[in-house]
Image (cartoon, grey):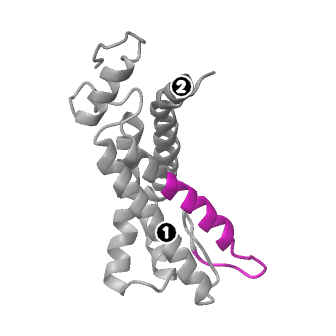
Amino acid sequence: MNASVASQSARSAIPWVTTVARLVLGGVLIAAGGLKIGNPADSVVAVRAYELLPEQVATAAGYGLPIVEVVVGVLLIVGLMTRVAAVIAALLMFAFVFGIAWAWAHGLRIDCGCFGGGGQLGAGQEPTYLLDIVRDFGLVLLGAWIVRFPPGRFALDRPLGLAGAEHLLDEEENGDEQGRPGEVGA
């Protein structure tokens, strides 16, 4: 396989990688927000446990975070406003990485509250800070990928004309999804 064919193969894989990244990041956000949205008081307890935000801000964040997670997750899954949703998702994940690192550095013994629950750990329970940080940083990287290579396949951004000029240029060079060279696909 020559370099030109390999390069073309790699370029044609990018939208599929973006699609997988959108589905994974969006699915995680929907799961996390969905598990918290039914019990906002627990979400408030989880945010307060970090001892990072003033009381009123922590309370507002605890109530608002599950809604933001679900909305951004849905936007990523359907590929609507993909780049904006990915920026928000990546910033959320980075904030979670920072918060968990903060708790760890300050000797707090809390559950991250990432998928519901949260707050102080019970006797005999150990925090999983390193695992939580690695997971969330991986999700930051997925968000960064989506920001760089939006919108991926099967995104609503395409038929709505929100994919951007760079996406249309790529399709003109590579052909559309059906593999027809030179045709701009929707």
The answer to whether residue 35 is visible is no
* Foreground of the two, 109 or 59: 109
Farthest top residue in view: 180
The reply, left or right, for residue 157 in relation to residue 141 is left
* Amino acid type, label 1: Phe
The reply, left or right, for residue 117 in relation to residue 167 is right
- Quadrant of residue 1 within the rendered picture: top right
* Amino acid type, label 2: Ser
Give the SS element for disc 1. Answer: helix
Q: How crowded is mark 2: few (under 14 residues within 10 Å), some or many (20 or more)?
A: few
The residue segment tinted magenta is 119-141
The residue that disc 1 covers is: 96
Q: In which quarter of the image is the C terminus?
A: top left
* Foreground of the two, 61 or 160: 160
The answer to whether residue 31 is visible is yes
Residue 6 percent location from the top left of the image: 57, 27
Residue at x-position 40% and y-position 50%: 70
Q: How far apart are marks 1 and 2 (CA)?
A: 35 Å
Give the SS element for disc 2. Answer: helix
The residue that disc 2 covers is: 9
Which dot, 1 or 2, sits closer to the camera? 2
